[in-house]
Image (cartoon, rainbow, N blue to C red):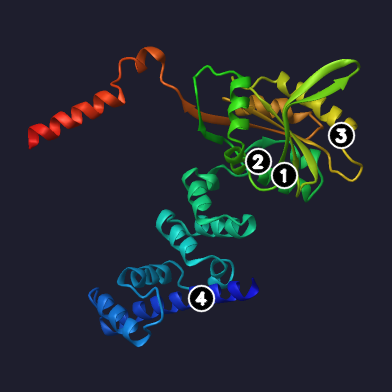
Amino acid sequence: MRAAVAVNQELVLLYWRIGKEILSRQEQEGWGKNVIPRLSKDLSSAFPEMKGLSPRNLGYMKSFAEAWPDEAILQEPLAKLTWFHNLTLLEKIKAREERLWYARAVIGHGWSRNVLVIQIEAGLYRRQGKAITNFTKALPVPQSDLAQQLLKDPYNFDFLTLSKDADEREVETGLVAHIQRFLLELGTGFSFLGRQYPLEIAGEAYRLDLLFYHIKLRCFVIIDLKSGPFKPEYTGKMNFYLAAVDDMLKHPSDNPSIGLILCKSKKQLVVEYALRNTATPMGIAEFKHLEKLPAELKGSLPTIEEIEAELETTEDTED
């Protein structure tokens, strides 16, 4: 594994140096754009067993060197990424700090290139750590900082297609049915323990919408789903659940449990007031999902068969 990582680092650095050399020659000796195809041919002849010397890849090397003019930045973390991860950052993100943020996230979470693309397209950089919480006063440092960075706002459940008026149970059922995508959206470290998790308190039955354990935080995480806007009384219910889980499930070596209330919408000032005097750690964030077309609108749209028939008619007319 160490050998493979070392080889990858040297390859990324080699590509950067080739790109840097092309930029230098263009600036000092007036090389034009047409030199890259010729350079590709010459390098391929000189190193017939080496791959990655196509004109297109040489163009990427040049762009890579333009984006990162300082070789020192490559050592950490860019040289630890594969060339294809680096190309994805280059093509999909313009801002330097955002590229670095995703690069560190790839290393920290072990994302594949496909997962990286999903996270970029879902706008993770703009959502991570944005939930409104009371962690700074309810949790000790550094747990409070780590917990804050774990929560997003909003959560993107676009893998769900539900009606506009879907209730909590429908959302919950959809999330569990797509548990792999749900866990990916939650982030690294969440271990799913169950839905409608039962607790018996003073002879009465209570159920938690979703219960997780976070490996790095070493604590239980309770998620309460609300299909409408946030209401202040939701924090009281979550406070009750957190106290019960800490008393009934938490091991002495575990950290205090954390609550996350997910709502369709929220007003920041209302959330801040609701959390201000709450001692148990919790956060509030929004979630969104794809919406089904209303039945009356859906019936007015053409079916797949009608669209295909129309296309066939058009093709016959053109012929």
Whole-percent x, y for residue 239 in the image: 80, 26
Q: Which residue is mark 3?
A: 249
**Residue type marked 3:** Leu
Which of pointers 3 and 1 indicates the residue nearer the eye? 3
Q: Please report whichever mark, 1 or 4, sits nearer to the chain's N-terminal start.
A: 4
Q: Total marks drawn?
A: 4
State the residue at coordinates (91%, 17%). Answer: 202
Q: Please report whichever mark, 3 or 1, sits nearer to the chain's N-terminal start.
A: 1
Badge number at residue 151:
2
Whole-percent x, y for residue 251 in the image: 89, 40
Q: Quick check: 97 above or below 13?
A: above
Q: Please report whichever mark, 4 or 2, sits nearer to the chain's N-terminal start.
A: 4
Which of pointers 3 and 2 indicates the residue nearer the eye? 3
Badge number at residue 147:
1
State yes or no: discs 2 and 1 in contact (Cβ < 8 Å).
yes
Badge number at residue 71:
4
The reply, left or right, for residue 154 in relation to residue 92 is: right
Mark 1 element type: helix
Query: Which quadrant would residue 155 be assigned to in this image?
Result: top right
Q: Residues within 10 Å of mark 3 (few under 14, many from 20)?
A: few
**Residue type marked 4:** Glu
